[in-house]
Amino acid sequence: MEAQYLAGKLAKGFLRTNNIDSNSRLCMASAASGYKLSLGADGPPGSYQDIDRLDCALVIGANMAECHPILFLRLMDRKKRGAKIIVVDPRRTATADKADLFLPIKPGTDLALLNGLLHLLEQAGHTDEQFVSQSTEGWAELKAMLPEYPPERVARLTGLREEDLRRAAQWIGEAPEFSTFWTMGLNQSTHGTWQTNAICNLHLAAGKICRPGSGPFSLTGQPNAMGGREVGYLSHTLPGQRSVSDAADRAAVEQIWGVPPGSIQPKPGPDAVEMFQKIEAGQVQVVWIIGTNPVASMPNRSRVIAALQRAEYVIVQDAFHPTETTRYADLLLPGALWAEAEGTMVNSERGVTLMPRAVAPPGDARADWQIIAQVAQHLGFGGHFNYASASEVFDEIRQTWNAKTGYDLRGMDYPKLRVASRQWPMPPDAERGDAIRYVNPARTTAGAARITFPTPSGKARFFARPFLPPAEQPDAQFPFILTNGRVEHQWHTLTKTGKVARLNKLNPGAFLQIHPLDADQLGVLQGGLVRVASRRGFAIYPAQVTDRVRPGECFAPIHWNDQYGENLCVNATTTEARDEISLQPEFKFSAVALTRVAAAVPDDFSSEQKNILLRHLAQFRPGSPAQLEGAPFTASQREFIRHLLAQPES
Ligand SMILES: Nc1nc2c(c(=O)[nH]1)N[C@H]1C(S)=C(S)[C@@H](COP(=O)(O)OP(=O)(O)OC[C@H]3O[C@@H](n4cnc5c(=O)[nH]c(N)nc54)[C@H](O)[C@@H]3O)O[C@H]1N2
Ligand SMILES: Nc1nc2c(c(=O)[nH]1)N[C@H]1C(S)=C(S)[C@@H](COP(=O)(O)OP(=O)(O)OC[C@H]3O[C@@H](n4cnc5c(=O)[nH]c(N)nc54)[C@H](O)[C@@H]3O)O[C@H]1N2
Ligand SMILES: [Mo]
């Protein structure tokens, strides 16, 4: 968190530019903007311990079993005690395997589902009128929209069965305590903010929020994605859950930073996608990339590459080299990894953890916050970046507490964090943080609102959010829908997990999940190469033929990129279309064409390799390409063999 804070301070306070954007734009931006609109402030109102109290969980657009496995185990413990788990995903994931009810939704239609569920709840009288009248506003407008979402229509839009919709609504309505968990399946959408609003609508209407076991819980992505949001590292935010477009917020931060009034620019800077568009257009000449690998992780990566080639000077501050992005760097700055330097991280439930330094950083590497502070000193801002330790940076962050949103770290410091993690809000002298936000202990008497939301009226807001389709629709030229995501044992662009042999054994390589009917049509067998092309670019993957995806849809993991072979990057195909409010890209939905690829025969087989190959071919059964793992073949030979196995007669 300290490095993110200092990067923002240097850019927005001293370089006086909001040309700084961050990981959250690709990850949590839609949850952040949705929370802010619905509840008045970013961050979930509840905590992980809600899992131990819930009676029904809606897991939507999240593959918890693979991406949040520890929390998922906690949820499974609760399931053993009778809680009902509903999973909504276009793919039958490992998470779906454990569901009591699995809803295999048509991609991009979750808003229709969420509105339809609320409609059924309302019809069945499962709304909480007292809560709605005391603690919310906008119910009449939302209620007026709901009749547009009768089960028959919702079933048609989402591809789900009417009886399943009714069952889900019944479970949600009858559960004393109900929580929703969501991640990238909803956030990475042109309607991501609206989907967060629609989830909040459900909880507010049912009155199932801000009490143990109930609430809309957005699962955070990166270990410190929440901390980054809080210290204001997006192009429109400032530390302490503040906004550059708010005069009082700017003044408060200018005072903490000791810069003259008017230093912070009121106009939000470009979002990550627009930033690369500007670099490509020559409007930004120098780029400093810290702890992210945009050549692999940004949508429509051909633009990112063009931009980095056009830029006059590219600085990449990373813990590893080479990566897909360091290839384009003019200057490398070696950042220390989390275990090599002291610093704090904030998790999904607002828990602040101090990561102690376990080993010394190698070579010239040093903590990211130190590198940023040293650059600031060289730029002549020395007095303002003169920290002896990460702890001193943290103490400055504590000053950015915000009475409006309840963001408050004043009750914790490094000595306390060395003993145990703490949760905010934690005012000075508090023994511990609040597990549930917005509860007003002074107003528990009958008739008074027990919950006060950080909005001007103190009430949460309903938003009527109609269903709209994704930006790009399949057509005759690009008839398939490509979605993408993660696998259990790999992390993002593999700079870390890709170096661990045991993890590579568990998740060895890229693949494309396609339905058997589609594979038949394409003439592709298990392991055969498929070219996935969108309007923007293409990638080539070995097919994983499986009915875990629906016909017409396919899925590729995001992890394997240029360091692992050519044409592996899924973001060659993805779209720059963004949510209008959060500006988060619609990673999860592109229209693509699929074609079978004929692989070239590599001419470098040794006689030993030929023998192994012949033995494998003799034993070959369709669907068993895993037999090849461990054999001493090069990547291009493997590709050829996979292709061969897809066509054993040739
Ligand atoms: N093992 C592992 N764990 C991780 C990470 C990792 O790289 N590896 N990364 C971390 C980070 S930063 C993040 S953000 C999280 C991401 O965690 P998740 O969001 O759970 O992971 P994803 O696989 O990106 O996407 C989740 C699911 O969304 C589904 N989906 C696609 N389109 C739709 C749709 O239209 N509607 C619905 N309902 N679902 C849809 C996909 O099929 C996929 O199963 O994971 C974190 N945890
Ligand atoms: N198609 C598609 N694209 C996606 C997504 C998707 O679901 N689909 N998900 C999006 C999401 S949610 C996320 S979170 C992003 C992830 O995208 P990235 O953040 O770009 O992915 P990482 O591999 O985590 O990259 C982090 C980089 O920082 C480096 N690094 C690691 N630790 C340190 C450190 O301590 N200091 C420094 N200086 N460097 C360090 C790593 O070596 C790596 O190069 O991808 C986004 N892109
Ligand atoms: Mo993420």
Image: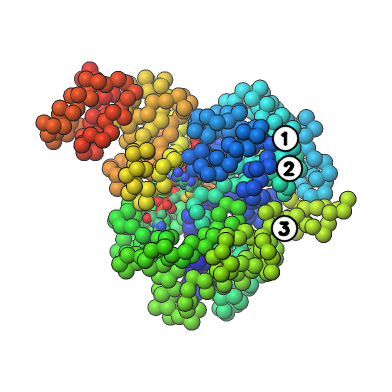
Alpha carbon of mark 1 to alpha carbon of mark 2: how far? 9 Å
Lower position in the chain sequence, tag 2 or tag 3: 2
Residue 643 drawn at (x, y percent):
26, 28
Instruction: Please state which amino acid type lies under the numbered disc 1.
Output: Ala
For label 1, the residue is 175
Whether tag 1 and tag 2 are in contact, CB under 8 A, the answer is: yes
**Labels 2, 3: front one:** 2
For label 2, the residue is 208
Mark 3, residues whose alpha carbon is within 10 Å: few (<14), some, or many (≥20)? many
Which residue is situated farthest in the top direction here?
649
Instruction: Please state which amino acid type lies under the numbered disc 2.
Output: Lys
Lower position in the chain sequence, tag 3 or tag 1: 1
Identify the residue at horizontal 69%, vertical 53% (top origin). Answer: 436
Q: Is residue 53 visible?
A: yes
Residue 89 drawn at (x, y percent):
54, 33
**Labels 1, 2: front one:** 1
Whether residue 96 is situated above or below residue 306 in the rendered picture: above
**Labels 3, 1: front one:** 1
Identify the residue at horizontal 39%, vertical 78% (top origin). Answer: 378
Closest to the observer: 229 or 575?
229
Closest to the observer: 610 or 520?
610
Whether residue 404 is situated above or below residue 468 in the rendered picture: below
Lower position in the chain sequence, tag 1 or tag 2: 1
For label 3, the residue is 454
